[in-house]
Image (spheres, rainbow, N blue to C red):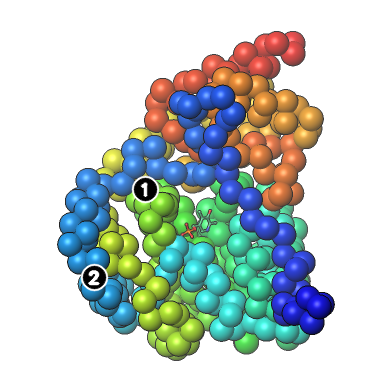
Amino acid sequence: MTDYIRPQPGIMDIALYEGGKAHVAGLSDAVKLSSNENPFGPSDRAKDAYTRAVHKLHRYPNTDHAALREAIGDVHGLDPARIVCGVGSDEIIHMLCQAYAGPRDEVVFTEHGFLMYRISTMAAGATPVSVPERERTTDVDAILAACNTRTRLVFIANPNNPTGTMIGLPEIERLAQALPKQAVLVIDGAYAEYVEGYDGGAQLATDRPNVFMTRTFSKIYGLGGLRIGWGYGPKAIIDVLNRVRGPFNLSTAQLDAAEAAMRDRDHVERSRDENTRLRAWLAAALAERGVPSDTSMANFILARFADATEAEACDTWLQSQGLIVRRVAGYGLPHCLRITIGDEASCRRVAHAIGQFKGQKA
Ligand SMILES: *Cc1c(COP(=O)(O)O)cnc(C)c1O
């Protein structure tokens, strides 16, 4: 009588997360540009640290993540006591929802926002509230209009995935200032390192009691496979998250690799410079071939097509050419394809293949 065994209300309404495709049937050497991974991989120092961790496998990891938090604090000029580390920023997002949102509470995010906001909200039994964007860009007034006495969390990714667009810090500050007093603004800085001179919202999270920042090692650090993220904000929120966090949520290998990666600033800088250069090149090359995109501040481009049919046909063609990009219909953008900025050869291949696709139709 399995009818008696039921999950909490709302759990079965969660749509399963679908990751970027990793393979094309029949092709072993396809280029994967579907998950915003760093084409140069992680720092060699991170790889060495990971390898050395093999000698400590019988030991439990430390629970306070002190060395990693100190490295993050040194590099970003932040108080390590206000940092919490998790299994990717996904876990930080999850802990925020678990700790701050429950039945009858609302969590606000934007219509083309990261899918994990909805998933973690529903897992906590809270109600997701999706608000419109303006020209595929976060609209502070629309967010404020959606807030009320039930709003507990507001998530914005800045730059956003999958649009690549971002809003300025004064706009974010205006949002933080005008939120209902029981709501926390979470600024997801998964792509912050790609924006020269942008602190990801760190200063706001330092100064304001209602702003929290999340960051990840999955994107510019090239460690998506290892699952490490972190959050920074008011001490009171850190104290709450540490109560729901599993004491051994990060393994020794994760902690050691992340610490080494954080301290290798050359690798981060090189990755950002290459991304900036190739992103400009690819955006211009696609525009020339009749495929526009918004100015992206991240490590991908959201290519726009005439309609969903054309976007799907182009995706199919790219796959036949050994190129895997991301369909984003699940993000409310069926006429778009998200293309990660790969290395130079991959960018040239994508531009060439999309040119062929457009040419065939003409
Ligand atoms: C990739 C991404 C993350 C990172 O998730 P991890 O769990 O750290 O791998 C977070 N937010 C956004 C918007 C992303 O695109």
Residue 233 position in % (x across, y down): 43, 77
Task: Tell me what residue is drawn at x 65 percent, y 66 percent.
Answer: 119
Q: Is residue 163 visible?
A: yes
Q: Is residue 234 visible?
A: no
Question: Left of 200 or right of it: where is 15?
Answer: right
Q: Closer to us: mark 1 or mark 2?
A: 2
Task: Tell me what residue is drawn at x 56 percent, y 24 percent.
Answer: 26
The residue at which mark 1 appears reads as 222
Residue 192 position in % (x across, y down): 43, 55
Q: Looking at the image, tell me whether mark 1 or mark 2 is earlier in sequence order.
A: 2
Question: Left of 131 or right of it: where is 278?
Answer: left
Report how far apart the C-alphas of labels 1 and 2 lie in the structure: 26 Å
Task: Tell me what residue is drawn at x 54 percent, y 17 percent.
Answer: 352
Nearest to the observer: residue 75 or residue 144: 75
**Considering only vertical position in the picture, is 197 above or below 283?**
below
For label 1, being within 8 Å of ligand 1 is answered: no
The residue at which mark 2 appears reads as 58
